[in-house]
Image (cartoon, helix red, strand yellow):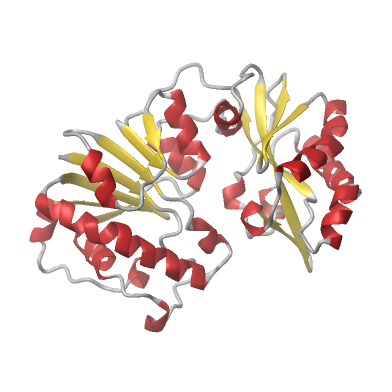
C-alpha cells in the first residue's frame, strides 16, 4: 500500500456560473469528491502550497527563495549569492490595466531569448546585478545583498492586471524604477520590432520574483515525486528525492509504487486554463483527468492499493481511503458545488 498526494491547480474553473452543458461527464471525480473529507487549507497560492508540500520556509519574512532553488535545476554552475527570477513576459495594455501574459501565450526560442537578454544585460549591470538566461522562459538576476522587498510569484499575476502585484517594501520605488527602465529598453529592442513585424507578441517586460539565497539544508517528506513543473522538480533535486515526469496514467505509478511509499504527484499544466478563463481548455483538462487518473484512483482506493489519498486544489484539501466508500449516503454532486467552501 502507498500514500498518494495529488496536487492539481486549476481543477476548479474560476467561474461558478457554469451550466450542466459546460461540464463534461466526470462520474469518477464527482464520486471521489463526494466520499472524501473536505477542509480548507492555509495555502491559497500555487508557490506557497508547493513550498508547504516540501516544508520550505520563507527567508527573513520576505520571498520564498524560488529563484535560487530553480536555478540549481536550470544551471547549477553557480549557487552563491542572492538570486531573483526575471521571467520574460508580455504586458498587454487594456484601458488602464497592464495584463501579464506568460510564455504559455507566446513563442520565445533560444535565439530570441539570448538576444533580448543581451539587450538588458548592461542596464542590469548598472544596478549591480548579473543576468543569466539559461532557459528561454526562466531568467535570473544575481546580486550580493538581499533586497528589502516582497514580490508576487508569476503564477498569481498571469492573466491579471499587474498593478496590485508590484513589489512592496522599503525598496519598492527603487525596483519600480528598474522595472520601468527594463520595459523601455525592451520596447526599443530591434528584435522586438522584428517580432511585431512577424505578428508575434513582443517581450516587453521582465517579471521579478522569488528572491533569496539557496537554503543551507533541505529535506523532503516524499519517497517519490512525479511533477510537470520546475519548482517541485528542483525541490526534489535539492532534497535528494527521486523524481520523474508524470506518466500517462495512474496505472503506471501504481505498478512502480513500493509498500509504504509517500508519493507526490503534481499536475500543474491545467492552471493556465483557470488563469486565462479558457473554458474549452478546462473542459479538455478535466476530461483527461477523469479518463487517465480519477477512474483508476477510485479502483486503487477501493482495493486498498492506495492506503490514503490527498487531493489538493484551490484553497481546499480532500482526503479519502478505503473506508471512505462506506459512506454510502454521500451522493455525487456537480463539481460546481465545491467552488465555494
Quarter of the figure with the N terminus? top left
Give the image location of residue 71, x and y in percent: 60, 29
**Residue 36 in view:** no
Q: Which residue is drawn at 87% across and 55% down?
A: 194
Compared with residue 240, is residue 332 higher up or lower down, i.e. above or below?
Answer: below
Q: Could you say which quadrant of the image residue 66 lies in?
A: top right
Left or right placement of residue 311 versus residue 190 in this view = left
Question: Considering depth in this image, is 198 or 220 the residue closer to the camera?
Answer: 198
Left or right placement of residue 152 versus residue 329 in this view = right
**Residue 279 in view:** yes
Compared with residue 2, is residue 77 higher up or lower down, i.e. above or below?
Answer: above
Quarter of the figure with the C terminus? bottom left
Give the image location of residue 11, x and y in percent: 41, 60
Give the image location of residue 163, x and y in percent: 72, 54
Give the image location of residue 193, x and y in percent: 88, 55
Q: Which residue is drawn at 56% across and 22% down?
A: 214
Left or right placement of residue 71 versus residue 107 in this view = left
Compared with residue 247, is residue 54 higher up or lower down, i.e. above or below?
Answer: above
Amino acid at each position: 500500500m502507498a500514500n498518494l498526494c495529488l496536487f492539481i491547480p486549476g481543477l476548479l474553473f474560476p467561474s461558478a456560473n457554469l451550466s450542466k452543458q459546460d461540464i463534461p461527464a466526470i462520474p469518477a471525480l464527482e464520486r471521489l469528491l463526494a466520499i472524501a473529507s473536505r477542509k480548507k487549507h492555509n495555502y491559497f497560492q500555487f508557490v506557497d502550497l508547493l513550498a508547504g508540500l516540501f516544508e520550505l520556509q520563507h527567508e527573513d519574512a520576505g520571498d520564498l527563495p524560488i529563484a535560487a532553488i530553480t536555478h540549481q535545476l536550470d544551471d547549477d554552475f553557480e549557487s552563491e549569492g542572492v538570486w531573483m527570477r526575471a521571467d520574460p513576459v508580455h504586458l498587454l495594455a487594456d484601458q488602464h490595466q497592464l495584463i501579464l501574459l506568460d510564455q504559455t501565450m507566446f513563442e520565445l526560442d533560444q535565439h530570441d531569448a539570448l538576444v533580448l537578454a543581451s539587450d538588458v544585460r548592461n542596464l542590469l549591470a548598472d544596478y549591480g546585478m548579473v543576468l543569466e538566461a539559461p532557459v528561454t522562459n526562466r531568467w535570473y538576476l544575481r546580486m550580493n545583498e538581499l533586497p528589502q522587498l516582497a514580490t508576487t510569484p508569476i503564477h498569481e499575476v498571469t492573466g491579471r492586471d499587474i498593478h496590485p502585484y508590484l513589489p512592496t517594501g522599503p525598496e519598492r520605488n527603487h525596483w519600480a524604477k528598474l522595472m520601468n527602465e527594463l520595459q523601455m529598453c525592451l520596447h526599443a529592442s530591434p528584435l522586438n520590432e522584428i517580432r511585431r513585424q512577424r505578428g508575434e507578441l513582443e517581450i516587453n517586460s521582465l517579471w521579478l520574483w522569488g528572491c533569496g539565497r539557496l537554503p543551507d539544508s533541505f529535506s523532503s517528506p516524499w519517497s517519490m515525486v512525479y511533477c510537470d513543473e520546475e519548482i517541485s522538480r528542483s525541490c526534489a533535486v535539492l532534497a535528494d528525492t527521486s523524481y520523474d515526469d508524470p506518466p500517462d496514467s495512474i496505472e503506471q505509478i501504481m505498478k512502480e509504487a513500493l509498500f509504504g511509499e509517500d508519493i507526490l504527484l503534481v499536475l500543474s499544466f491545467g492552471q493556465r486554463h483557470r488563469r486565462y478563463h479558457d473554458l474549452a481548455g478546462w473542459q479538455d483538462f478535466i476530461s483527461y483527468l477523469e479518463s487517465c487518473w480519477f477512474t483508476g484512483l477510485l479502483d486503487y482506493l477501493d482495493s486498498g492499493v492506495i492506503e490514503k489519498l490527498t487531493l489538493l486544489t484551490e484553497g481546499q484539501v480532500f482526503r479519502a481511503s478505503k473506508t471512505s466508500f462506506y459512506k454510502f449516503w454521500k451522493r455525487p454532486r456537480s463539481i460546481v458545488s465545491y467552488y465555494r467552501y
